Image (cartoon, rainbow, N blue to C red):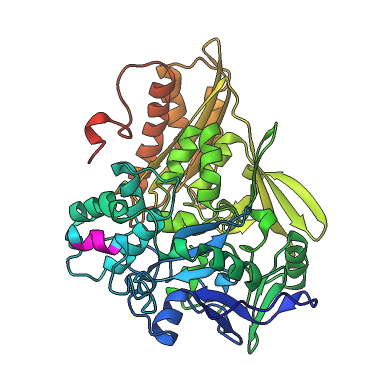
Amino acid sequence: MTGTAPASGASGKTDTLRFLLGDEVRELRNIDPTVSVLQYLRETEGRCGTKEGCAEGDCGACSVVIAELDDERKLTYRAVNACIQFLPTLHGKQLITVEDLKPQQHDEVNAQALHPVQQAMVDCHGSQCGFCTPGIVMSLFAMFHDETSAKDRGAINDALAGNLCRCTGYGPIVKAAQRMRSYGAKDQFDARAEVTVETLAGLAGAETLVLKQGARRFFAPTTADQLAGLVIAYPDACILAGGTDVGLWVTKQHQILETVIYTGDVAELHRVEETPDGIRIGAAATYVEAQNVLAREYPDFGELIRRLGSVQIRNSGTIGGNIANASPIGDSAPVLLAAGARLVLRRGGERRELPLDQFFHAYRETDLTSGEFLESILVPRRNPAAKLRCYKITKRFDQDISAICAAFAVELEGGIVKSLRTGFGGMAAIPKRADACEAALTGKAWTRENIEAAMDALDSDFSPMSDMRASRDYRATLARNLLLKFFFETSGAEGETRLVGHKDLAHA
């Protein structure tokens, strides 16, 4: 360890990015605000174990692990995609790459030893061509340090879903994951944990990180009040949360972002709170941070999040960002529409609440005014009398963009539809409710005949487009059939309608 960074000053701002690379402190100034962690590792640090594959967060070849302190000053480890993670987001955190896993040479006893994850990969013959192997090792390393993670095949499959191996050698890799803890439950990072905690506690402090390079700026406030002031001062700034979409603006579209305001260091915006009325999700809360709470209230929502991207994406991506960027194929919006979610929008010290179905105006256009930002999402408690289901239709099960995502919530009273809410993604320029379909069923008997009439009404609700994921006709047919499937699942009709959890697929 090279030492602890100086304590935070009284100015409230710092122009120095401080983080740990392995066990060494890095202090950087005057850097490109949108340089990726991957670029920095390969081009500045010469750490070429981290590979570039897709440059869009899909393949996992660039997977690294970020360690940071939780509210109890304990280290948490999460795998992320280095290709779309901007370097300044590492402020106050520890970056761990595959080069860090082998014990350091000053450890005379274990200098030639491999990390338990690496040794398991060697002994189980988990590496083939080797290009994707460092990323796979880092994903398993994060799992190795997650004491809450299950050890079964399903959990391993989820952990590896974001690492694509074109050699198709997943059998030995899964065996390595099952065996890795047999080489030891602790590693050198556990041995250094106390020192790492103290170092990280002194790196960031409560200061706002302000980086500049020419006319370009990067701000990382630490409170919601600081964030509110910055958004008013720079109303045209790019507000960055997880970067799982914004990162591609840089890597794929080659956009130059002049001013970036990062929300990831604002503790208030990471809170996920259960209240008597529902769940309040801070706009910077990641999918992983919100998943368990949402799954307890809405089991289908939890399953939808499990299929949203990969672990690396869910560790970075946020529900707030998914809503605020107003993508017509964002997967969280349809189920939130069906659940009746509301948004808290903030400008300076003023806040207003808005139903989610009034937030989206047109393609990538929202109700946000100049200087305003999304602060939190309010998800109501599930009505015990209502049934909610959501469906994500893709070409493959894991880590794929939806051709269509649909959600339905119905409350029946004596077999009559008392209320019905819907939400669709991929069917229009915005995430949208199906008003005609809802009207066709509200107050009517929950019968196959009335469902078929509502299926016809869907044709007037949407005029979907054709693209690389699905044709217009396919989407229109899917929407109709998903409503019918929802009817079967909520009317007591016999027959299995879902593959998840099927006994014959448990180890597929």
Kindly identify the residue that appears in the image at 56 percent across and 74 percent down. Answer: 19
- Outermost residue toward the right? 349
Kindly identify the residue that appears in the image at 37 percent across and 60 percent down. Answer: 141
x and y percent of residue 316 in the render?
A: 50, 59
x and y percent of residue 12 in the render?
A: 77, 74
- Outermost residue toward the bottom? 214
Kindly identify the residue that appears in the image at 35 percent across and 45 percent down. Answer: 155
Q: Is residue 120 magenta?
A: yes
Report the magenta stretch's main SS: helix
Magenta-highlighted residues: 118-122
Quarter of the image for the C terminus: give it: top left
Q: Nearer the viewer, residue 50 or 463?
A: 50
Q: Nearer the viewer, residue 214 or 356?
A: 214
x and y percent of residue 308 in the render?
A: 43, 49
Task: In the rendered view, tell whether residue 406 sits above or below residue 410.
Answer: below
Task: In the rendered view, tell whether residue 224 sits above or below residue 97.
Answer: above
Residue 394 in sight in this render: no
x and y percent of residue 379 in the render?
A: 63, 39
Q: Nearer the viewer, residue 122 or 386?
A: 122
- Outermost residue toward the top? 414
Task: In the rendered view, tell whether residue 145 sits above or below residue 248.
Answer: above
Q: Is residue 299 magenta?
A: no
